[in-house]
Image (cartoon, rainbow, N blue to C red):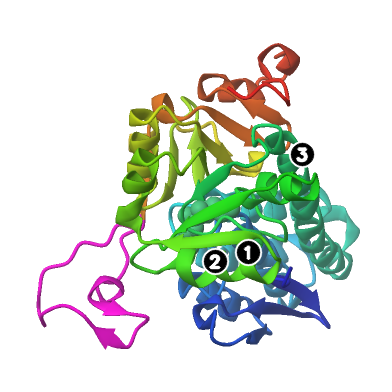
Amino acid sequence: MIPTIEWKDGKVLMLDQTKLPGEIVYVDCADYKTVAKGIKELWIRGAPAIGIAAAMGVALAARDIKAKDFDSFYGKLVPACDHLAAQRPTAVNLFWAIDRMKRFAALHRDEGVAKIKELLAREACKVLEEDIKINRAIGEFGAGFIRDGDTVLTHCNAGSLATGGYGTATAPIRVAVEQGKRIKVFADETRPVLQGARLTAWELMHDGIDVTLITDNMAGYFMQKGEIDLAVVGTDRTVRNGDVANKIGTYTVAVLCKEHGLPFYVAAPTSTIDLSMPSGEHIPIEERHPCEVTDVCGSLCIAPRGVKVKNPAFDVTPARYITAIITEKGAFRPRDIRKLGDAGADLDKVRIKREERP
Ligand code: MRU
């Protein structure tokens, strides 16, 4: 697996995913504003990876603050956090990571500014380390739902490139392959930014996993022919009633799965769960630049000049289309996801058994 992001020599080293699959280029981000630019411009993307980048961005911002006492330090940290938070609206991991870093700083307020800066850098690295472990746990829980010989459809890139490593949607696939199951993956190309074609197809090929690229409008055809057994996707935000927001086109895949009686799984770390939102219609959907639709890979124009364009980057899949949400704490029916925020809940009662494919 190619590392997506690293904290190295006091800088954030970020793989520029806009250049894939043609070139492997790492950008050195020496300050938080460059990290913010990387999030906005999709050098780094995918909800968990955005969270990791934001945590590292906060650590860089903290390091560069000149302040003698905590209050003046914190007063300067908050605007930097706000700047990072303003880059993309949908993936809740961005806000989750920034809040975590702010709370962590406040918790250590009595330890002195120099010490807090050092601790924040360590905490950001911990966010990355934890993500790698969480991905693995998602894989262990999810692999039980994939049978020997299955073909799995995935949409966008919820792979190692979207996380600290291993991926969310790709984690069950990777573990199933490690278990010796013969698995094939169909990757939707994922217009308009082509995360499926440029990233998922590339990373799975790189790791020796059998992958076939299809355009977004081909999924129904292959389901009708019985060539797809299940779908696994990621999410940018999962809310209280189990609705999820993920890359535009995910809803279409979920509806197709229901029509064909196929399981539709969502794989995500619990940091992607936002229990403060009651249902999916409240999730802010990012509208991106029209040129992503009118041009391919920023160079070839495929539409008439001046045409009206809409470019929502995400859609909401209602809970009723989702078979299970696979997290590092186990797999759950969407209606039970709210119990993850309930300290008194007995999760064993609602956790789906590993080998029991719902
Ligand atoms: O616009 P992107 O590339 O950041 O969108 C990414 C997705 O939609 C992913 O499926 C989602 O963030 C989950 S990543 C594990």
Residue 81 in sight in this render? yes
304 inside magenta stretch = yes
Location of the N terminus by quadrant is bottom right
Dot 1 falls on a residue whose secondary structure is helix
In the foreground, 151 or 128: 151
In the foreground, 147 or 166: 147
Q: In this orientation, which residue lies closer to the viewer: 325 or 354?
A: 354
Give, as a single range, the part of the protein colored magenta.
286-313
- Expressed as whole percent of the image width and height from the top left, the position of residue 77 reads 65, 65
- The residue labelled by disc 3 is 140
Q: Which residue is mark 2?
A: 201
Mark 2 touching mark 1, by CB under 8 A? Answer: yes
Q: Is residue 338 left or right of residue 189?
A: right
| Residue drawn at x 31%, y 73% as measured from the top left | 292
Q: Residue at x 30, y 60 (%)?
A: 287
**SS of the residue at dot 3?**
helix
Residue at coordinates 73% horizontally, 34% vertically from top-left?
141
Instruction: Decide which of 309, 297 is in the foreground and name it.
Output: 297
Q: Which residue is mark 1?
A: 204
